[in-house]
Amino acid sequence: MKIDLTNLFNGSKNEISVNHSFDMSDLIYSSYTPIKDAVTVKGKLFSKADVVYLDINIAFAFNGFCDRCAEEIVKDFSFSVKKIVVEELQNENDDDDYIVVKNRVLDLQELVNEEVSLNLPTKILCNDDCKGLCPQCGANLNVSKCDCKKDVDPRLSALLQLLDEE
């Protein structure tokens, strides 16, 4: 979706409302596609004191696997994007707060793809206190305890033999 910002760059006080859904089912995260449903974008573009601002909220459901226990999970993500829209940057080092548009046209699809990719977590857990899998038998420690013996540090194995003799 392309949005013409000519009126805003010319000082118009009219806001441009954004309420759109995008299909991002082809986005690859790790080795799978986590976004099955639409990504919704709501917000506005507006001009204030001859500066064009973008203020949007991006929301989607993340379908994936817990990085500790490998259980399937669905988590809702939502984050806001607030940036200044410019036609060119004088200093290339300050590009995090700005969006550079060509010909006064903003490609919203491209922006949303980039923001979603940058805001996906590097590690996803089913819950904050996930216990994961037993490294020996593979049992999900969130569901049940396993009867595996804990590994003993080889430096302390001689002391363990003393306990076995009693």
Image: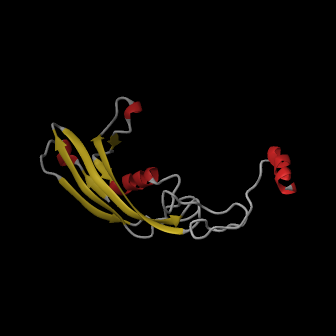
The residue positioned 63% from the left and 67% from the top of the image is: 145
The residue positioned 33% from the left and 65% from the top of the image is: 21
Q: Quadrant of residue 52?
A: top left
Name the spot of residue 43 as percent of width and height, x first.
Answer: 24, 55
Name the spot of residue 153 as percent of width and height, x first.
Answer: 78, 48
**Residue projecting furthest to the top:** 91
Residue 62 vs 165, above or below: the answer is below
Q: Is 75 placed left or right of 108 in the picture?
A: right
The residue positioned 67% from the left and 67% from the top of the image is: 146
Q: How many marks?
A: 0
Q: Is 93 placed left or right of 2 in the picture?
A: right
Q: Is 24 placed left or right of 69 in the picture?
A: left
**Residue projecting furthest to the left:** 13
The residue positioned 53% from the left and 69% from the top of the image is: 72
Which is nearer the eye, 101 or 25?
Answer: 25
Q: Is 11 placed left or right of 98 in the picture?
A: left
Name the spot of residue 110 as percent of width and height, x first.
Answer: 39, 54
**Residue projecting furthest to the front:** 166
Quarter of the picture holding the C terminus: bottom right
Quarter of the picture holding the N terminus: bottom left
The structure's colour scheme is secondary structure
Name the spot of residue 109 as percent of width and height, x first.
Answer: 37, 57
Which is nearer the eye, 80 or 145?
Answer: 145
